[in-house]
Image (tube, rainbow, N blue to C red):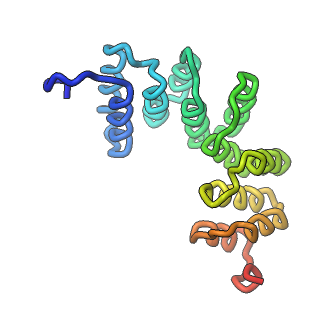
C-alpha cells in the first residue's frame, strides 16, 4: 500500500492489525504497530482498540493498560477493548474497576461494554450487580431482538449466580430465541424442553 503511494491512517491500520490477530500472526501485528508509531498514529482512537488487543494477545496486559491510560481521548470502543481483554485473562475485578472509572469519567454503558460487565458478573456470581446491569440494559433499550447475544449472556449470568427464576423468566421473555440461548438454558439449568415451552 505504501509503495503505491497511498497514505496510512488509523482506520486502515486498525484493519491490518485485526487481520493479524485473526490469522494469529501477532509478530506482523507488532510490525503494524511500529508503523503506527512511525506515522504518529499510535494514539488514534480507531487504532488504539486494535493495539490494545495486540498487547493482550501477546500476553502483555500491563502494556495494554499502559497504552489505555496514555490515550488523551477515550471512546466506548477503547473502554470495551480493555474490558474484553481483562475478561479473557479472567481478571473480573479489573473489569469492575474500569466500569467504575468509566462512569466517573461520564461515559455510559453501550451494548458491547454491557456484555463485558454481564460476563464478569456471571464469572464471579455477582447476582446483585448483574441485576443492576440488566436494569440498565432495559432502561437503554438493549433488550430488543437486535441484542440476542446480550440477552443470552444475561440468562447465563443469572444461572451462574444461582438465580434460576430470573434466568428462566428472561428466557421466556426473549422473542427470537436462537440455538445458543436454548443451549445455555438447557445445559446450565437442566430444564426439559417441555418445561421451557409451557
Where's residue 31, x and y in %?
30, 26
Where's residue 105, x and y in %?
71, 22
**The C terminus, quarter of image:** bottom right
Q: In the picture provided, is 64 more to the left or to the right than 153?
A: left
Report the residue at 36% width, 16% height from top. 37
Q: Where 181 falls versus 195 (above or below)?
A: above
**Can residue 193 be seen in the rendering of this structure?**
yes
Q: Where 15 falls versus 38 (above or below)?
A: below
Report the residue at 55% width, 34% height from top. 77
Report the residue at 65% width, 60% height from top. 152
**The N terminus, quarter of image:** top left
Q: Where 57 falls versus 38 (above or below)?
A: below
Where's residue 106, x and y in %?
72, 25
How many marks the image carries: the answer is 0
**Can residue 123 be seen in the rendering of this structure?**
no
Q: In the picture provided, is 91 more to the left or to the right than 21?
A: right
Q: In which image quadrant can residue 146 be found?
A: bottom right
Report the residue at 29% width, 32% height from top. 28
Which residue extends farthest left?
4
Where's residue 114, x and y in %?
67, 44
Name the foreground residue: 142 vs 129.
Answer: 142
Q: In the picture provided, is 56 more to the left or to the right than 31?
A: right
Name the foreground residue: 161 vs 76.
Answer: 76
Amino acid at each position: 500500500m505504501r509503495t503505491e503511494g497511498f497514505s496510512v491512517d488509523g482506520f486502515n491500520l486498525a484493519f491490518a492489525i485485526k487481520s493479524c490477530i485473526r490469522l494469529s500472526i501477532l509478530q506482523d501485528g507488532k510490525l503494524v504497530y511500529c508503523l503506527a508509531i512511525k506515522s504518529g498514529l499510535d494514539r488514534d482512537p480507531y487504532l488504539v482498540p486494535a493495539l490494545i488487543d495486540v498487547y493482550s494477545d501477546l500476553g502483555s496486559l500491563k502494556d495494554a493498560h499502559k497504552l489505555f491510560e496514555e490515550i488523551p481521548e477515550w471512546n466506548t470502543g477503547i473502554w470495551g477493548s480493555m474490558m474484553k481483554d481483562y475478561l479473557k485473562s479472567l481478571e473480573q475485578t479489573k473489569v469492575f474497576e474500569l466500569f467504575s472509572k468509566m462512569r466517573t469519567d461520564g461515559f455510559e454503558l453501550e451494548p458491547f461494554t454491557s456484555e463485558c460487565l454481564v460476563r464478569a458478573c456471571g464469572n464471579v456470581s455477582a447476582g446483585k450487580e448483574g441485576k443492576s446491569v440488566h436494569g440498565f440494559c432495559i432502561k437503554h433499550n438493549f433488550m430488543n431482538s437486535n441484542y440476542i447475544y446480550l440477552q443470552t449472556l444475561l440468562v447465563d449470568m443469572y444461572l451462574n449466580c444461582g438465580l434460576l427464576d430470573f434466568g428462566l423468566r428472561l428466557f421466556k421473555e426473549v422473542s427470537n430465541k436462537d440455538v445458543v440461548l436454548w443451549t445455555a438454558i438447557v445445559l446450565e439449568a437442566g430444564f426439559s424442553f417441555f418445561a421451557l415451552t409451557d
